[in-house]
Image (tube, helix red, strand yellow):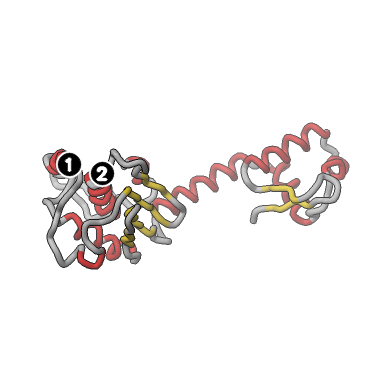
Amino acid sequence: MRRLRNFVDAPYIEGPDIFGTEDNSQLFCLREGVVNFCAHSDYFAAAHPTIRVFNDKIVMQNPGRFILDATEFRSRVLSMPRNPSIIKFFRHPKLSENAGYGIDKIIRWKELTGCEVKFNSDLLISTVTYPLAKNNSRQTMQSRSENEEINEEINEEIKKVLDFISQNPTITQPKIVLQFGYSKSKVNRIIAKLRELGLLTREGSNKTGRWVVKK
C-alpha cells in the first residue's frame, strides 16, 4: 500500500483528538481492492497474482475467474473468498468490510476519480482495473518535483548547449566544441548528462544522424 499511495490521492484528515480520522479517499477504495485481491488469490495456481502500476491505471490480476458476473457484483451480496482466513485477518483491525460489502467501496472509485473500475474475467484470469484520474494531485506534485530536480541539475552552460542543439539538430559534437570553445571531454560530459536526464536522444549514426530534444 505504501507504493500504491504514491499514485492516488490520500489526504490526511485530522480529528479533534489530533489523530487521523477515516477518510473516503481514493486510497481508501484501493485498500479494499487490495484486501479482496489477496483474499481471492489462488496461491497454488501456475500463474501468479500480480499488481501492475501504469501511468494511467492500476491493474490487479488473479488466476481463475470471478464467481459472479461483473454485472451482478452490486446487486447480490455473496462472498466466497478463496482465502477466508485472510479476510478475517484484515477485518479484525477494521481494514476491510464485512463479507459482500467491500464492493461498494471499490465501486465508489468512480465518484472520486470520474473513472469507472473495470472488471474482466475469463476461464484463465480475472482482472480489476482502476483508471487513474488525470488531475491526480499526487501525480502532479511528483511530476513537479521531478522537473524541479532536473532544473536544479542543469546549469547555464548545459542550457546553452541544449538550446543550441535544439536549433541545430544535425550538429556534431566536434562542432559543439568549436561553437562554445569547450574541451571535447566537457562536451561529452554535458551530452551524457542531458541523456541521463532524458532531455536528449540521438537518432542515426554520429555523422549522419540527428539529435532529438525533449520539449
Quarter of the rendering containing residue 181 = top right
Q: CA distance from mark 2 to mark 1?
A: 10 Å
User: Is 160 left, or right, of 154 in this rendering?
Assistant: right
User: Is 89 left, or right, of 33 in this rendering?
Assistant: left
Quarter of the rendering containing residue 72 = bottom left
Name the residue beneath numbered marker 1: 90
User: Is 215 left, or right, of 181 in this rendering?
Assistant: left
Q: Earlier in the sequence, mark 2 or mark 1?
A: 2
Q: Secondary structure at mark 1?
A: helix
User: Is 212 left, or right, of 101 in this rendering?
Assistant: right
Find residue 38 and name its label. 2
Q: Secondary structure at mark 2?
A: helix
Vertical relation: 184 (above or below) 206? above
- Are the residues flagged by discs 2 and 1 in contact, CB closer than 8 Å? yes
From the top left corner, tell me how far across and down residue 48 is, in percent.
36, 42
Disc 2 residue type? Cys
From the top left corner, tell me how far across and down residue 193 is, in percent.
67, 38
Vertical relation: 186 (above or below) 47? above
Disc 1 residue type? Phe
Quadrant of the image for the C terminus?
bottom right
From the top left corner, tell me how far across and down residue 51 is, in percent.
37, 46
| Residue located at (33% from left, 62% from top) | 118
| Residue located at (74% from left, 50% from top) | 203
Quadrant of the image for the N terminus?
top left
Toward the viewer: 82 or 190? 82
| Residue located at (27% from left, 65% from top) | 111
| Residue located at (82% from left, 36% from top) | 182
